[in-house]
Amino acid sequence: MNAKSILVLVLSGAWFWFCQNWHCCWVRGVCCANSITEKAVAPAATTPETTKNLAAENGPLVFNWSNEKATTTDKFPAFKDAQLANMTADNFLEITGYYYPEEENTSQFANMGLARANDIKQRFTDKIPPERIRIKAQLRSKADDKVKSNAFESAKFSWIAAEKKEEVVEELEDRMLVRFPYNSTQKVRNPEIDNYLSNLATQLQKSGEKVLLTGHTDNKGDEAYNNKLGLQRANVIRDILIRKGVDKSLIMVESKGEKQAIATNDTEEGRQANRRTEIKILK
């Protein structure tokens, strides 16, 4: 074989190799195998969900925006065991799911907080009977762009003694809750509530801070009636504060009726929790 023939063979082989790799790597996006014993390897796929989950900073239990389904990491089994270590013979696990006012409710629950709490509940029923798990919801402050674009923790766990009843005044992260009896505009009669409102009135008079009162109901009755009932409950607390010396201009009132449940309306206990006025000091 002369030199010219060898050159033609070399150039032909080089052209064949170039065409094969150009077709695979540039056209198909998958680089081909270098030999018959090697397999082609496609680049790892990256989805928005993967990006969000990676941003969760290894939290054991996180959620994505407007999504009721939790994402767990390899830390979740140990986290679950730590929660269950507080279980006694008769106490209850209370799971509070958080949600934001801007989130779209894509669930079948009254809000995403209850939906998230229920999703977490299903992950514990292999270790604790479902009737010993109570779910609640809590509305958080307005979300920033970081929360909307990344996975975030969105639940609180508490163990409740069997004999403990629903508090008539409940302190949350950024607000207080005052309970009301069924279909009533009169707050629960309790010295604890009176003391709290007296202290609040003194604080508002000294600081000049404004306060937002939001009335809520359970889901009994029609929506229009519940909106009216919720507003009446907010006005009751407003009038008490005014009588205690708070300037009317510092008090804002509104009603959410049955729309922002913090517990299930399927039980009397849950409905009792939903009958409330929320008190939030505006900074």
Image (cartoon, rainbow, N blue to C red):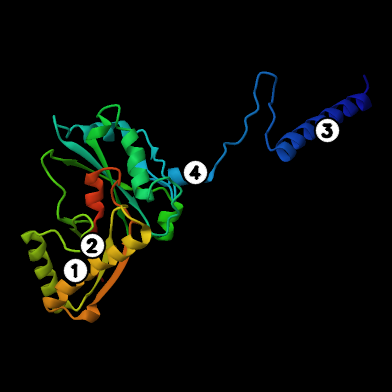
Q: Look at the numbered discs 2 and 1 and tell me whether their residues touch, using CB distance below 8 Å.
A: yes
Q: Nearer the viewer, mark 1 or mark 4?
A: 1
Along the line of sight, which residue is nearer the eye, 281 or 74?
281
User: Is 37 above or below relative to 156?
Assistant: above
Binning the other alpha carbons within 10 Å of mark 4 as few (below 14), some (14 to 19) or many (20 upward) gives: few
- Answer whether residue 53 is visible to the viewer in this image: yes
Q: Look at the numbered discs 2 and 4 and tell me whether their residues touch, using CB distance below 8 Å.
A: no
> Which residue has dot 1 on it?
237
> Which residue has dot 3 on it?
15
Quadrant where the image shows the N terminus: top right
* CA distance separating discs 3 and 2: 79 Å
The numbered mark, 2 or 4, whose residue comes first in the sequence reads: 4
> Which residue has dot 4 on it?
49
* CA distance separating discs 2 and 1: 8 Å
Callout 3 secondary element: helix
Along the line of sight, which residue is nearer the eye, 177 or 127?
177
- Answer whether residue 60 is visible to the viewer in this image: no
